Image (tube, rainbow, N blue to C red):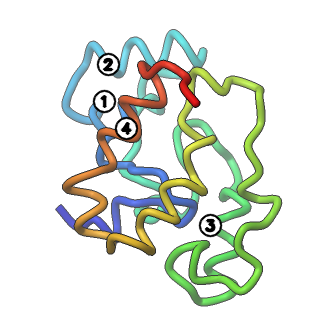
């Protein structure tokens, strides 16, 4: 697995995403198609880096992808403006998509290194995000 290629510039772990798994799993592809009301042929993803910044049914590249390309950096945490409003968490669909984990993941990538984060932590972050209980 090429973790650099399969980790989005904003810190999402594409290699753990249901849309990535949908490439090999028809049931997941059908569920994504139904949930997002998109054609089944667009209900899978190979990661934004492999798709020019466009995922699923997007017609334009993601703003983050365009930004890192223009700045010639690999990840947002390499930027002098990190964190910026492109990474701002939003309540809209917060429980459905892991976008609110981006800054946390980017900090872990910087601290642990990409491969260590990908192998040892990324799946746990996703699990905690979806299934964990809030605690102080």
Find numbered disc 2 in the image and state the secondary structure of the residue it sits on: helix
Dot 2 crowding, Cα within 10 Å, few <14, some 14–19, many 20+: some
Q: Relative to 34, does residue 85 appear above or below in the rendering?
A: below
Structural distance between the alpha carbons of marks 3 and 2: 25 Å
Q: Quadrant of residue 93?
A: top right
Q: Residues within 10 Å of mark 3 (few under 14, many from 20)?
A: many
Task: Determine which residue is flagged by label 4.
Answer: 17
Q: Would you say 10 lies left or right of 64 here?
A: left
In this rendering, is residue 130 above or below 54? Answer: above
Question: Which residue bears the numbered disc 2?
Answer: 28
Q: Which residue is mark 3?
A: 65
First in sequence: mark 4 or mark 3? 4
Q: Earlier in the sequence, mark 1 or mark 3?
A: 1
Q: CA distance from mark 1 to mark 4?
A: 9 Å
Distance CA(mark 4)–CA(mark 3): 17 Å
In this picture, residue 10 sits left or right of residue 24:
right
Residue 55 shown left or right of residue 41 in the figure: right
List x then y, in percent, for residue 76: 61, 72
């Amino acid at each position: 697995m090429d973790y650099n290629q399969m980790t989005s510039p904003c810190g999402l772990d594409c290699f753990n995403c249901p849309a990535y798994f949908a490439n090999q799993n028809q049931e997941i592809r059908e569920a994504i198609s139904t949930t997002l009301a998109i054609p089944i042929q667009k209900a899978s993803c190979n990661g934004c880096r492999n798709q020019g910044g466009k995922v699923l049914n997007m017609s334009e590249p993601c703003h983050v992808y365009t930004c890192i390309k223009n700045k010639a950096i690999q990840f947002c945490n390499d930027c002098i403006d990190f964190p910026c409003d492109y990474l701002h968490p939003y309540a809209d669909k917060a429980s459905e998509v892991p976008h609110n984990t981006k800054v946390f993941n980017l900090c872990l990538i910087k601290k642990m290194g990409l491969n260590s984060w990908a192998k040892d932590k990324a799946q746990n972050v996703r699990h905690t995000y979806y299934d964990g209980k809030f605690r102080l």
